[in-house]
Structures are given as C-alpha cells and as structure tokens.
Amino acid sequence: MTTSSSSSQQSPFESELAVHLVDAVQLDMDPHEIDPTSPLFGEGLGLDSIDVLEIALMVNTQYSIKLESHDENNRKIFHSLRSLAQYIETHRPAR
Amino acid sequence: MSGNTWLRPEKGNRLTAYLLIGIIKHLGPHAASWLRGPATLYYALFYPTVRRASWRYLTHLYHAGKLDRRPHHLMVLQHIYAYSTNIVDRIFLLSGRFDPDKIQCHGTEHLHAALQHGKGCILMGAHIGSFDALRQFGLTASVRFRMLMYRRFLGTTSHFIEQLAPDFNADIIELGQPDSMLTTVSALKKGQVVGILADRAHDQSRSIALPFLGHKAPLPAGPFQLAALTGAPVVLVSALRQKNGAYRIACEPLLDTLLTDEPAAPLKADPTPLMGRYAQWMEGLCQRSPFAWFNFFDFWEEGL
C-alpha cells in the first residue's frame, strides 16, 4: 500500500473518489473536506445502508468493480474513504 | 426523541412475552387466550402512552371520515384488546399451531406476476394486522422469503421468534448494518421476496412527512428509494383478522406499472408519489379494520 494510513490528507485517487461519493449519495459537503480516515457509516459521515448501496452502484459504474453482499470484508471496505479507495485500487481491472 | 419510543424494548412487553411463553409451554396455547382481558386492563391502566396513542389514532380516523362512530373510551379498550389478540395469534402462528385453513389469500396473482420479472419482489406491509400471518404466507410460497427488520430493538418480537420459531432467524436481514441493503439487493437479484414493514420512520434524515388520516406523519423514504434503486416490483400485503378469527391476506401492486426496466431515478430522488400511494393504502386498511392499527406510539409526532 502506498497510501499512508495515518494521514488525514486525501491522496489524488481519494480526492477523485470523494467527488463521485458525494455525488452518489448527494452529500451536502465539499468532497475535499472528507477526512479519508473517518467512518462513512453511522458516526462520521452519517451514511446509512442505502447510501452504502448507492456507493456500491457508483463503484460498479465508475470502476467496474462489483461489490458482493456476501463479502465478509464489506464492513472493512466501506469503513472509510481510504479503505474504499484502497479496495478499488487493488481490485480495479487493468486499463 | 419521543417519536422513536418503539425502538426501545419495553420492560413490560418483555415480561409479558416471558409470561406468555411460559404459560404456553406449561399449560398449552389456549391458556394464553384467557389472558387477553387481564392483559388489556393491565396495558390500559399502566401504559398511559398506549392509551393516548390509541385515542389520538381513533380521533384522527374519525375526523378523516374513516370511522363511522365518534370515538369513545371503550374503543381504546377494544383497540388494546385487538392487540392482545394479535399477540396470542402470533404465538399460535410462530409455533406452527395456527389452523392453516384460517388463512385466506387474495390477490396472490400480483405476487406471481411481480416475480415474473426476475428482480425479486419487495413485499411491503405495515404494523396493521398480523405480521406473522404474512410470514405464514411467505412460508407457503415457493421462493425464499426474507424479512428486513431491526432485530436488536424488537424486544417482544425477538423473544417470541427465538423461543417459538428459531428457524426464522436465518431469514431475517438485519437493518441498521452497513451491508443491510447490499444483502437485500443480492436477495432480490436471486429472485427472493423481501418483506418490509414500511410505516415506521426510524431515521429522521430519511423520512418524509406526508398526510396520513388528515395529519402529516413522518414516513420512511428508505423502502421506496430501495424500490426505485433496484427496480424491484413492490407488492403491498396486509393480513387483517376477520370476525371468525381467520386472517385475510390481501396483495395488491403499489403501482399499476412496475418499476422494472430502468431503475427509477426520479422516484429515488423524490419517492413521495410512491409514499403517498402507500399512505392511502394504509388508510384503507384502517377504515376496514379500525382496531388493527398497532402503532401505539406518537406516530404523528404531535406530542402525546
């Protein structure tokens, strides 16, 4: 992993993903203000499971990655902007 | 938040659940029927919120022109008695001792038609009538029936389920988890039926106040947004108790045209047309069976 997990600065890919995420769940905030380490669900950004579904649909459209419901890692993947970005970066098909 | 009192399991309910389960296990299910009278008096005396919630509902129902008599206080007792009957029936239903001939299904062709689209089906109900009779209906269907619910909040229900129908747990999709909707979508994609009671707004950020019995009440937008996002057809289903103790299960489509081909983006952004139709459907049920309304809390958030 190239991203430093302690930094609260968005990496270039995290910034790109943040824009899509804010758009997908119609979050009323500047994408660049999202702390990449803060939880997406519940506390933190306050997203719910319908938002998580919309993020999954967005990830599928933008990055051609299907997030499966039975993946036991879902809670880790959707934990934060950073964990989601890392998952996409390691799983996106080579272009 | 006064409007969310139903989220907290009530001590009294839990005690009642244990008491009822104990009585059934030792004395048989019929003994539970005798308790309906005392239970009604107990609730009426010691649960002023239940009493006030019932009165508020009956008053709104009357002023909306859906109750033919002006409400009087005996009706509150009748209403609570109907709830006690519902709980006793629930025990028979969950333990598999309810006479299957006393469950009559109408409009099941709508469910079959919905399933033809291969997108599963959202079977949408309300806390009106019997949820467990609906489940009985699900058990007889040829496809897997899943139920979306808040397991951790439902004190009485979860005790009943654990004690009387342990198999049911596997079919519950727990709400309030990050992957709740991902699991739901996957179930729908497999062509399964997902049941949801869509009348209680648990999340203020995802609820919309709509007129219900003449007054605005917060209703959850989530179930309708889920329908719009997945394109899964929605079938409304109710199970109302008839005078002879049988349950009449009735299905009808939420919309005449199904949201099947393209996920309905405009409806996701603004699900109020779907929700308005749902509210009307609930009004119809309340008019038909005035005492089958089992939302004994500050439903309209007007203060009790």
Image (spheres, coloured by chain):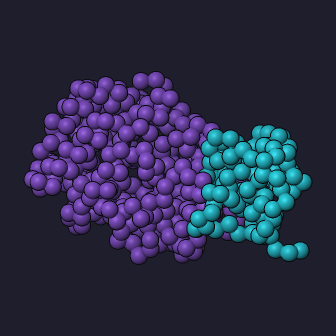
Q: Residue at x 44, y 71 (%)?
A: B144
Residue B47, by quadrant, is top left
Q: In the rendered view, does B176 fall on the left or right side of A38?
A: left
**Chain in purple (letter):** B
Dividing the image into 4 quarters, which one contains the C terminus of chain B?
top left
Residue B37 placement, left or right of B256:
left
Residue B254, compared with residue B66, is above or below; it is below
A70 vs B60, left or right, is right
Residue at image point 15% right, 38% down: B37
Chain colored cyan:
A
Q: Residue at x 36, y 54 (%)?
A: B131
Q: In x, y percent, where is residue A45?
A: 70, 42
User: x and y percent of residue B230 in the render?
Assistant: 63, 62
Residue drawn where x is 54% and y is 68% of the image: B187
Q: Is residue B231 visible?
A: yes
Is residue B51 placed above or below B220 in the rendered structure? above
Q: Is residue B249 visible?
A: no
Front one among B215 and B186: B186
Number of marks present in the image shown: 0
Q: Indicate the position of residue B120 as horizontal and vertical percent values.
A: 54, 69
Where residue B152 sits: x, y (%)? 43, 47
| Pick the front one: B299 or A45 | A45
Q: Quadrant of residue B43?
A: top left
Q: Give the left or right position of residue B90, taking residue B7 as reference.
A: left
